[in-house]
Image (spheres, helix red, strand yellow):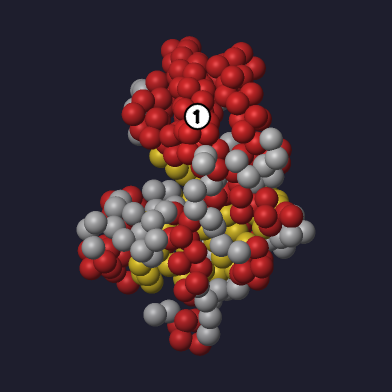
Amino acid sequence: MTARAEMGDPTVSVIVPHFSDLTRLDACLEALARQTFPPDDFEIIVSDNNSPQGEAAVRRAVACRARVTVTMARGAGPARNGGARLARGRLLAFTDCDCIPEPEWLQEGVAALADHDFVGGRMKVLVENPDRLTAVEAFERAYAFDNEDYVRRKAFTVTANLFCPREVFDRVGGFEVGVSEDVDWCHRAQAAGYKIGYAPRAVVGHPARRTWRELIVKWRRMNAEQFGLYRRRRFGRLIWFARACLLPTSPLIHGGRALRSESLRSVRQRLDALIVLFGIRAWRSADSLRLLAASWDAKP
């Protein structure tokens, strides 16, 4: 326990949901230990989602670096909610167990809350060797985690890099299950009158997916969660159908991003990114139609 924890509550509670990834959790905790924010003024809470290794193994891996709680309800959203319930800070900072926050992440994110009700920071896609990317890594470097665009144009931030006062979190309510929890929470916050801001110097790194299988696993989950949001909207299924039909043509609009990307170092990497872009958009279209058909079949 830190000296400040003995005297009173810390200013910030960092909440890290975790499921069955002790190696990356260790790296995340090491990165949090290098923060420039005063170490006695923040706590770390690892909210384990009932990992198969068991609570004892998680506690051994975490050691004295964080508090640990176990959330039995499956999903990153419930795990984050479980961590928030345990938090003592007046500010909450969310990241993920497979992420690497840069040293000034907390300092910059907290500073940005002086001007905004809640904040999303910059995301970086991490790769082992920038000169030798797989095609999927090239795609991720060009297209994944554009959090500035998410915040400024789509009015949400990924939950791997989210700051908010505890008071705001309590008023908006926790993260939901079965929908895109980041989009849903941020839009609920704005409906409640809170304004989102972007903190470009609050940086979190996220590892790129390397294989087509890893990319499909990601998008199968994201498609299902996005469909959960569309189903709530008036004419949501009709809009989803139109969106699914247009997805295969969308690379004609978005392909230029790979060609201009400063994260890609060669013509081969740019071509690989474009090939994956066409492939994943076609797959998402088919999967979106599958979800739509399944939802109609399930209706009484």
Q: Residue at x 43, y 48 (%)?
A: 99
Q: Secondary structure at mark 1?
A: helix
Q: Quadrant of the N terminus?
A: bottom left
Viewed as shown, does residue 2 lie left or right of 54? Answer: right
| Residue drawn at the location 47% of the way across and 71% of the way down | 43
Query: In which quarter of the view is residue 117 placed?
Result: bottom right
Please name the residue shown 61% across and 30% down the image: 240
Residue 284 seen in the current view: no
Check the image and report above or below for 161 versus 215: below
Which residue is outermost to the bottom? 7
Q: Nearest the camera: 136 or 65?
A: 136
Q: Residue beneath label 1, please?
A: 293
- Say if 149 sits above or below 187 in the image: above
The residue at the far right in this view is: 193
Q: Using the image, determine if residue 276 lies above or below residue 158.
A: above
The reply to whether residue 296 is visible in this rendering is: yes
| Disc 1 residue type (three-letter) | Ala
Name which quarter of the figure residue 252 lies in: top right
User: Dot 1 surroundings within 10 Å: few (below 14), some, or many (20 or more)?
Assistant: few
